[in-house]
Amino acid sequence: MSSDPRSKNKTFCKDGIKAYLDEYASKLNSCLQLISEVDLDKTRSLLLEVRKSQGRIFVAGNGGSAAIAEHLGCDWHKGVHIHSKPGLQIHSLVSNVALLTAVSNDFGYQKSFSYQLELSQLSKNDALVLISSSGNSDNIIEAAKYAKSLGCRIIGLTGFSGGQLKQLSDISLHVPYDNYGLVEDAHQILMHVIAQFHDLEYLNKHG
């Protein structure tokens, strides 16, 4: 059995819960300031490009990152919709529980996302958002390698050292800290910022 991932978490001030919160919030802000401006701008451009070409955006993650993927599926779809205009077409690879478990049962959990991408006939005109705090989850890496083989661009949201996903991603939104909660909070913030900025930018161009 793998070790409990909580053992990898750096913790904060233990003088009281408010002190813990204050230090947590301060470190979260510091980490957000370290996000690559170049990669944020690449993300902005890619979303506009995919929307213009009516390509698709697939998203996946495990555990808390799966919850972020589902949230992204809402905010990057409904949250940027403009009546009578083409929208972002978001497809979550964690939404269909029957399909997810069927693929995992038949081919192994490491294929749970890559096989779904094969079923969806992923192409180089699409984009793939992969969310993994460690950057080393087997099914995330399999999906990244499959996408790379097709020339599909990858946005990777990672934490800790970034793992293999950071290296495989065309666009790396890396949160350099060793705490799962903080990394996931940063990923949620990035997801919201990207959606809101895209909405403003698209409205300015097409509204």
Image (tube, rainbow, N blue to C red):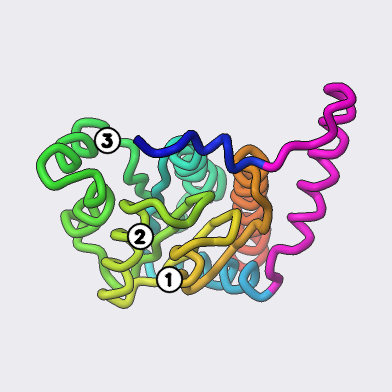
* The disc label shown at residue 141, or none: 2
Q: Give the answer, above or below, for where 178 lies relative to 45.
A: above
**Circle 2 sits in a helix, a strand or a loop, which is it?**
helix
Q: Quadrant of the rendered structure where residue 97 is? A: top left
Q: Residues within 10 Å of mark 2 (few under 14, many from 20)?
A: many
At horizontal 34% and vertical 40% (from top left) the residue drawn is: 94
Question: How much space separates mark 1 and mark 3, taking CA atoms?
Answer: 26 Å
**Disc number at residue 96?**
3
Which circle, 1 or 3, is nearer the viewer? 1
The answer, for residue 11, to whether it is visible in the render is yes
Kindly indicate whether the residue at mark 1 contacts the one at mark 2 (C-beta within 8 angstroms).
yes
- Residue 72 location (% of width, % of height): 50, 45
**Closer to the N terminus: mark 2 or mark 3?**
3
Q: Where does the image place residue 173, in percent across and percent down from the top left?
A: 59, 62
Residue furthest left in the image: 106
User: In this image, 172 relative to 32: left or right?
Assistant: left
Figure check: 74 above or below 206: above
Extent of the magenta region: 10-37
Assess whether residue 72 is covered by the magenta stretch: no
Would you say residue 207 is visible in this rendering? no
Q: Residues within 10 Å of mark 3 (few under 14, many from 20)?
A: few
Residue 27 as seen in the image, left or right of residue 201? right
Q: Quadrant of the N terminus?
A: top left
Q: Disc 2 to disc 1, how far (Cα)? A: 8 Å
Quarter-of-image position of residue 32? bottom right
Q: Are marks 1 and 3 in contact (CB under 8 Å)?
A: no
Amino acid type, callout 3: Asn
The quadrant of the rendering that contains the C terminus is: bottom right
Question: Which sits in the foreground, 47 or 175?
Answer: 175
Q: Which residue is mark 1?
A: 168
Residue drawn 24% across and 44% down?
Answer: 109
Reading the chain from its start, which is encountered first: label 1 or label 3? 3
